[in-house]
Amino acid sequence: MQTFIKFLLTVFTSFSIFCSNLLFPATVYPESDNFDFSFLQYPDEAIVTLEEAGLTEQELVGRASAQLPEYVQSGGYDDINGIIISPYYTAKVSNTEIPVYASVVFIRVDDTGTLHSFSEIYVDTSKDFSFNIEITGADVALKNAIVLPESHGVKAHCSDNKVTASISKAGIYTFLFNDANQYYGYTLIVREKIDEDAEIAEYIEEYGEDNVIVLDKGVYEYDYVNFVAQNNQVIYLREGAYVIANHLYDIDCAEDENKYFEPSAPGHNAIGLTRYPFLNFFNCNNLTLTGRGVIDMTRLDRRERRGVVFTNCNNINVSGIKIINSPEWSFISYCCTNVNIEQVDIIGNRGNCDGFAICNSHNVKVNDCFARVADDTFEVKALGGVMDSKNIAFTNCIAWGGYARCFGITGEVNKKISDVTFRDCAVVYRDGIWNNDRIGSLVVVAEQTEGSIDGVFFENIEIFRDEGRPILVKIYDEEAENFEIKNIVFRNISYTSYMKPKIAGTNSNTNTVQVELENITAFGKRLTNPQLIFNIGRYCKVTSR
């Protein structure tokens, strides 16, 4: 039955794209007079082509194949960095060629790897602008292009193996080609142009020159970077600053994960890690990590280190950076307050390289971020400790999930989680179906149930394609007693999926599951009574309108 549904959805997608291109062909607008932009460019010594690396495409993407043993698939490599020149595309903006980069990503539906291509440009957003982008396929034939999220309203036109589109606002634009094939995605990131020299000068004036650390364009290698009890500091990675994590410990099996110990590490984090995260911030106050640089952890073995980790910190601002191929949990906020994360992008192909993990933290904002990882992408947890999780908002974020979940409450609920919002976000693809009672695009899933969940809002979210469940609310712990999931709202949600949404508790009537559904659209049609479509379990109160 599911195979038949997949066939129908493939036909539906192809027909929808065909009709869109036929009835609403891409409009190429005149470009703004004197359109001025710049583009992200990494240093030549950091980025190579496949040919320069002596690798074929299949050799590189094959490193992410699930046919390999687990610790080989997720192992580190030092012969090539995590970003390369894309072999798939070249691109022009306003008739100027811009770099197209690529990183290895994981596709769960086939348990294999591919390359995700991307470019980034900077424009003056203080005034109206418009520009045309032209994408040319190198080793990829291009047809039937679409641009996601659909809420951007951007149409693409295909001709002679070129795709053109007109863009007139900042944002994250993902192009899919050839009947929405997810193997050859290309993302154009359009962000505000910033005068780095002026911005650095402002930081120096505010914090003092000794408190502003600047990495210029170039390659930097570190074993790890540790900030403990640092206050009023700025770490600025200029555009083109390429920071590489050095591989120190061979992790070839599960036993090796606990084999290596860095003596001072346990006293310098609040999570109990025995090895430093690559970028570790502990007991810091009023700290900024910003710029247009990249942090690349491709050399590290599976679970050799975690990525960028803030614990017991207050007044934290993180913006602009990219995090590539963390071996475990890319970005963590744990027991932190007043955290602002903006325009941070994460790409990774390894299991457990979760994107944004906001844990036991208060007053957190995550805005305008992109994540394509082989695990959860934008998640809230409560791992234990002294703090609960509350007042957390994700806005204008784009998720592409290659294994688990895209947006939501995931797994550990060992303290109360409350007042969490996911708004104006989008799912490009999510293709994991290994346990459809644990994973989905928009989820509230409690696997550990010592706390409670009260007030989670999913609003204005589009899901282009989910191979499993688009919405899942579930008490996964069958032993749970007196556990509450309440005031969960799904409003203005549109999806296409292979399975029904599900809301389920347990067989115990001592637990509470309370959900409100409003304006749910499936396969382009608004559901007049979502409860007829949703799979709803016992002891669940679901209202809809």
Image (cartoon, grey):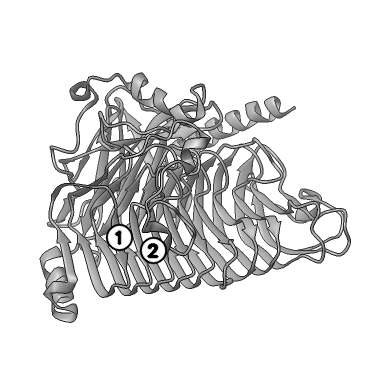
| Front-lying residue, 249 or 227 | 249
Q: Does any portion of residue 145 appear in the rendered image? A: no
Q: Which residue lies at the image location 30% right of the left edge and 22% below the top edge? A: 139
Q: Residues within 10 Å of mark 1 (few under 14, many from 20)?
A: some
Q: Can you say whether 414 is above or below 250 in the image? A: below
Query: Which amino acid does the dot numbered 1 rest on?
Result: Asn
x and y, in percent, of residue 405 in the image:
57, 47
Q: Residues within 10 Å of mark 2 (few under 14, many from 20)?
A: many
Query: Which quadrant is the N terminus positioned in?
Result: top right
Work out which residue is located at the far front of the displayed protein and give it: 263
The residue tagged 1 is 226
Mark sitting earlier along the chain (2/1): 1
Q: Secondary structure at mark 2?
A: helix
CB atoms at circles 2 and 1 under 8 Å apart?
A: yes
x and y, in percent, of residue 260 in the image:
41, 43
Query: Which amino acid does the dot numbered 2 rest on?
Result: His
Left or right: 272, with 416 as reference point: left
Q: Can you say whether 213 is above or below 17 in the image? A: below
Left or right: 535, with 98 as reference point: right
Q: Secondary structure at mark 1?
A: strand
Alpha-carbon span between mark 2 and mark 1: 8 Å
Residue 268, which numbered label?
2
Q: Can you say whether 150 is above or below 431 in the image? A: below
Q: Can you say whether 190 is above or below 523 in the image? A: below
